[in-house]
Every structure is written in structure tokens, then in C-alpha cells.
């Protein structure tokens, strides 16, 4: 290359246009690929975390429903309010005020040989995206909650 300078533009002593083109090592391409894949990776990671918390909510509610049914088996004539308070105490980090608890049969109908059922439903909010309070009074939830339900049935002796 030293003797033939036809078609080669010298920028300074050691750099030519050909060397600049040959020096392309793919750094720009890697940056573009990273920028395209990063949102997909972040969305996947967030989905895994949300699914893990939903699984935690279901396991916690199953445990609480089982504990409520055991409480009734131990004290068949306990009121529904007592059982609900006991179950809400077992919900861990879930908000007990949002849990919907149904108990059947009512305390007067719990006879030996019957089944007792405790059902807990909890509105799991996947993403809370609120429109500012200026637009609506209480905010607007873009995604409706997913109801997670756990049921436990036990036999009264």
C-alpha cells in the first residue's frame, strides 16, 4: 500500500479511509442489538416477578383457608366473624381488608358429619397505572385485577 495511493484519501500520516472502514469491529451493531433486546428482557423479568408474587398470594391464601377450616373443626360453633379475623391474621403481607372470605355452613348448621368450607378470594392487581387525579376522582386503573381464589374443605367429626 505504500507505493500505490490511487483511490486512497490520506487524512493524516497514519489514517486512511480504507483503514477507518476496515476498523469497523461491530460496536455499533452490538449497541443496536442491545437496545432492541433490553426491553424484551426487562418485560420478561417483570413478568417473572409478578408471577412469583401471584404464586405467593395463592399459597398464602391456601394456607389461611386451611387454617380457617381447622379453626372451625376445633371450635364448630365459632362465629363467622371470629373465623374471618383468624383467617385475616394468617394472610401474611397481603392486605386483609381486600380479602373476601366466605364460610359455609353458618355456625348454627355445623353438625358432626358435615363438611366445612372456607373460601378466600383476593383481587391481585398486576400493574397499578393511574391516570392523574385531575382527570378522575379516584384515579383510573388501566388493568383490572385478577381474582386469586383458594378453597379448603374439612370434615367435622
Image (tube, rainbow, N blue to C red):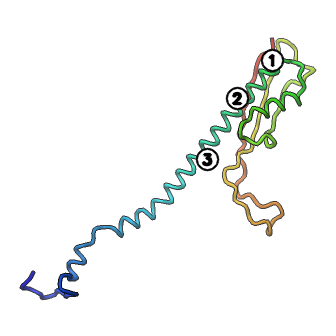
Question: Furthest residue to the left?
Answer: 3
Q: Residues within 10 Å of mark 1 (few under 14, many from 20)?
A: some
Q: Is residue 27 above or below residue 74?
A: below
* Image spot of residue 120 (x, y percent): 77, 34
Q: Residues within 10 Å of mark 2 (few under 14, many from 20)?
A: some
Q: Earlier in the sequence, mark 2 or mark 1?
A: 2
Q: Nearer the viewer, residue 82 or 21?
A: 82
Residue depicted at 71% across the width and 58% down the height: 142
* Image spot of residue 8 (x, y percent): 17, 86
Check disc 2 and report the residue beneath it.
63
Corner quadrant of residue 30 = bottom left
Q: Secondary structure at mark 1?
A: helix
Specify whether 82 is left or right of 130. right
State the separation of the CA atoms marked 3 and 1: 35 Å
State the separation of the CA atoms marked 3 and 2: 20 Å
Check disc 1 and report the residue beneath it.
73
Check disc 3 and report the residue beneath it.
50
- If the image is split into quadrants, where does the C terminus sit? top right
Amino acid at each position: 500500500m505504500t507505493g500505490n495511493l490511487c483511490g486512497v484519501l490520506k487524512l493524516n500520516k497514519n489514517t486512511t479511509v480504507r483503514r477507518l472502514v476496515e476498523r469497523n469491529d461491530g460496536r455499533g451493531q452490538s449497541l443496536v442489538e442491545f437496545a432492541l433486546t433490553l426491553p424484551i428482557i426487562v418485560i420478561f423479568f417483570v413478568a417473572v416477578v409478578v408471577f412469583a408474587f401471584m404464586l405467593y398470594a395463592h399459597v398464602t391464601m391456601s394456607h389461611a383457608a386451611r387454617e380457617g377450616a381447622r379453626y372451625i373443626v376445633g371450635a364448630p360453633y365459632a362465629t363467622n366473624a371470629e373465623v374471618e379475623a383468624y383467617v385475616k391474621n394468617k394472610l401474611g403481607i397481603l392486605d386483609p381488608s381486600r380479602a373476601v372470605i366466605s364460610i359455609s355452613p353458618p355456625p348454627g348448621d355445623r353438625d358432626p358429619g358435615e363438611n366445612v368450607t372456607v373460601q378466600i378470594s383476593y383481587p391481585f392487581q398486576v400493574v397499578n397505572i393511574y391516570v392523574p387525579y385531575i382527570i378522575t376522582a379516584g384515579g383510573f386503573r388501566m388493568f383490572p385485577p385478577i381474582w386469586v381464589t383458594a378453597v379448603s374443605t374439612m370434615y367435622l367429626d
